[in-house]
Image: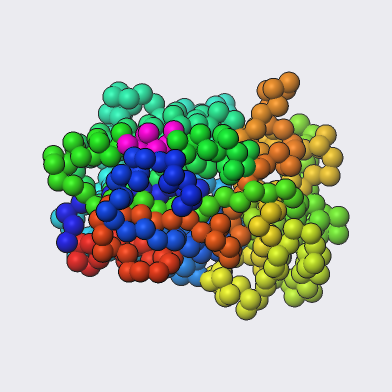
Amino acid sequence: MAEHVILISVPGLRGEDLELMPRLRELTLAGDRGALGPSFPCVTCPVQANMTTGCTPAEHGVVANGFYWREKNEIEMWTAWNDCIERPQIWDLLHERSQDITSAVWFPLHSKGCGADYICTPAPVHNPDGTESLWCYTKPSEMYGELRDAIGHFPLKHFWGPMANIKSSEWIMQSALLAAEKFKPNFFYIYVPHLDYAAQKIGPNSDQARQAVIDLDASLGLLVDGMRAAYRGIEPLWMIASEYTISPVDHVLYPNRVLRQEGLLTVKTEDSGGEILDTAASKTWALADHQFSHIFVRENDTQTVAQVRALFENREGVDEVLSGEQLARYDLNHPRSGSVVIVSTPNSWQAYYYWMDDAQAPSFARTVDIHRKPGYDPVELHIDMATKSIPLDATLVGGSHGAPARQESQRGVILTSQPGILLGGPVADTDVADLVVRQFGV
């Protein structure tokens, strides 16, 4: 059995990227390598829940990066606490075996309030005047103050938005080293997002994406060296797993605009004159998330469901339209799912835009505002230098993910530093939890 296991989650990592990563190749040279297949929807929050529970969305309930709480008529993007995950995670399973097996969880989504012994994840304070103060949720609670004093505030502006870069991943890894030195957890789960940025902004085969791989490898090398020092000569078992890969895109679908043109979606006007999606008054609306959308139909009206299906079937950029029992095809048969799910073709993605005229766009549309937008907005990686704001041109996006991983290029990679860890053949994201806990005799 292993005494220490470090799982690094690297979204966007492809097998071919290893040619540019000498430090990662060196680390895993004697270990196992396998293809890693993400389960649909292949996006951050569901895949992280799959990896840490060993279950699918039908069981753990994380059906997208955001939630629509029907009973409250409330959209929640990126702020949910750990209780949204309805199944035990790796650290819970390890504690069931022994409370002495400690875990640290560094920056995965939905980790606030989880059962791990040590936690660090972004939690900026939203002030009454609309500004934000930098902060992280940590366990123990005083740890963020200690990390801030040692290496500065977490650079949130480099974690997402037009200024996103390697600095955020470097802070994540530097802070993880400080925690490892102090706590020496048996299991350490670290989310390193750097490959997400250039591959979506410009495209996964761009020079910028290639440079991101090179930069990340250098930083991972420092992490490996630091962990060896922190664990005082005890060599941890390393596991490096892609969450998904990013595909080039050249088409955008706007599901909310389609619904609005059919009179199914309603808006209201904010004080500034922009339009706000009115989910309560709408017969249906779409929570757009990369290469899929959950379409929520009021009271799951069967006639409206049929109308929505007809609107999107055989439309450019749409691969599948799912409803009813068809949701079980991808383990999305959970009450939190929409009545209809639209799946993109690999070359297309879905934007949340619901206004028909950019002059009527809401005030938050031109800002980095991941919480008020009713969907994911990768255009936030771009900036209009003339206006110093986020442009409203969804065609700028060069890469996306989320569609079912049917092609080899849509499958990532899983690597280990020691042999005999993988069971042979392709590995699913839902296999990762078991691969980890087996190292501790669970």
Expressed as whole percent of the image width and height from the top left, the position of residue 74 reads 60, 53
**Residue 148, position in %: x, y?**
33, 26
What residue lies at 69% left-to-right and 22% top-to-bottom? 385
Q: Vertically, is 13 above or below 337?
A: above
Magenta residue span: 215-221
Q: Residue at x 13, y 41 (%)?
A: 233
Q: Is residue 58 above or below residue 83?
A: below
Q: Is residue 268 left or right of residue 70?
A: right
Residue 440 location, quadrant: bottom left
User: Where residue 273 sits: x, y (%)?
Assistant: 79, 34
Q: In the picture shown, does residue 326 fall above or below 393?
A: below
Q: Is residue 346 magenta?
A: no
Residue 60 placement: quadrant: bottom left
Q: Is residue 118 left or right of residue 344?
A: left
Viewed as shown, does residue 408 lie left or right of 125? right
Main secondary structure along the magenta-highlighted residues: helix
At x 32%, y 25%, the residue is: 151
In this view, the residue farthest toward the bottom is 325
Residue 384 pos. (x, y %): 70, 27
Q: Is residue 110 left or right of residue 278?
A: left
Is 138 in front, or is 28? 28
